[in-house]
Amino acid sequence: MFQAEVYIQRRKILCEKMGSGIVLFLGNQESPMNYLDNTYHFRQDSSFLYYFGIDFPSLAAIIDVDNQRQIIFGNDYTIDDIVWMGPQPTIADRAIPSGIFETQPTQNLFSILKNAQKSGREIHFLPPYRSENTIRLQSYLHISAEEVTNHASTRLAKAVISQREIKSAEEIIEIEKTVNLSVDMHIAAMKLARSGMRESHIAARVNEIAQEQDCTIAFPIIATINGQTLHNHSHHNILKEDDLFLLDAGAESAMHYAGDLSSTFPVSSRFTNIQKQIYQASLLAHEAAIQTIAPGIRFKDVHLAACLSITNSMKELGLMKGDASEAVAAGAHALFFPCGTGHMMGLDVHDMEDLGEVWVGYNGEPKSTQFGLKSLRLAKELLPGHVFTIEPGIYFIPELIDKWKSEGKFNEFLNWNEIEKFRNFGGIRNEEDFLVLETGYRRLGKEKPKTIAEVEKIRN
């Protein structure tokens, strides 16, 4: 945890933003895999961590804005629990480091919320993303499970986003630790991968490096020779010479701040000539996006800079034709780049997306419905303190190629005969993490091998 004053100030600011009412935060609970005592790895809710810092299951908290009262609710372990779990701090002991000195048993929360509802007081809560919290809200507030999300407080979500999106100095230090560890994970994979290995071998080593440092992984590892599948979580394939291997992996610290990096490298000691061409094109898009970062710039424009760079590269390779700007405006480039350039990052690897992408990434503005652009998670104006990924890629997806070709889509921009030569190429992505400063930006963490020369040096 951070110092208690950090959490006290965060809650004070939230009270000022909300003005009145009761703010209800539900921590996450243990979730059984197949029977009650065999649970998945526990992960506390990130907003609960942000305001209270207590990494322990089955807690709830209220901030009574009007009466300046803050309470943590939870049940202390019984002797039966202690037999299995060992001695544990009380809920009161756990609350003190967050600057809260009133705790009550969970059952008392029912009566407090019931009385608040009887008095006509407004109760604010964030949209739940776990079914067990939906059921808890149904029970606490007498709202049908189907209607719980509709009753979530947009006002609270916007207040939380406005705080969490600006990373403090202590948060940046924590994020940078995980980025540095993530770099170590990627370098280890580059050194390890060899023809004849299974993808799972590399994924296991990447996971091990995080665990060696008392960390975990921030999201399921993508470690694949099928880089054209954007979120490929299968690790069953055998690596072969001339394959490209794409790794998307990041560490999560004990305080649950995330790193997120991607690398693509040859299974052979060197890239083939055609791999070099596509890899260099992806790097040019990566650098074009980075050079666009600045406070006051919309991230949508950062994304479009990457799109334009990819289009120009595809024209040079003979895969596209026509006016590059017109092709991007029409969305023709999305055949090769059907996703977004990046997303916010912090306590969640896709930070705060449970609070609503339209607010987190768009400040309430409607998202595009255009293929490719509709997958852009972040588009709004960048502010000092924003942390996000830069990760444009180039992908050859046979099914998408076949669909668009059969439809005659964007024939004025796409050279199908040349594109067919690349249908089994795969996909390439590099990804790094950035912080917006008052006058520019800074890449977070130590350098990850990225250029062709740097990658080949490790592979040899």
Image (cartoon, grey):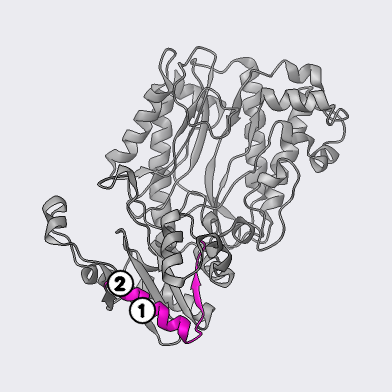
The C terminus: image quadrant: top left
Instruction: Give the structural element (helix, strand or loop) at label 2.
Output: helix
- Residue 88 lies in what quarter of the image? bottom left
* In the image, residue 118 lies in the stretch drawn in magenta: yes
Above or below — where is 170 with respect to 189? Answer: below
Front-lying residue, 320 or 29: 29
Residue 59 location (% of width, % of height): 32, 64
Residue 347 seen in the current view: no
Instruction: Give the structural element (helix, strand or loop) at label 1.
Output: helix
Residue type pointed to by label 1: Ser
* In the image, residue 100 lies in the stretch drawn in magenta: no
Q: Residue at x 31, y 58 (%)?
A: 57
Q: What residue is shown with label 2? A: 107
The N terminus: image quadrant: bottom left
CB-based contact (under 8 Å), mark 1 and mark 2: no
Residue type pointed to by label 2: Gln
The tag on residue 228 is none
Above or below — where is 97 with respect to 305? Answer: below
Above or below — where is 116 with respect to 316? Answer: below
Residue 186 location (% of width, % of height): 43, 33
Residue stretch rendered in magenta on the structure? 105-127
Front-lying residue, 419 or 151: 151
Q: Residue at x 42, y 38 (%)?
A: 183
Please tell me how many numbered marks the rendered image carries: 2
Q: What residue is shown with label 1? A: 111
User: Would residue 153 be found to the left or right of residue 22 on screen?
Assistant: right
Residue 277 seen in the current view: yes
Bin the neighbour count of mark 1 within 10 Å (Cα to Cα): few under 14, some 14-19, many 20 and up: few
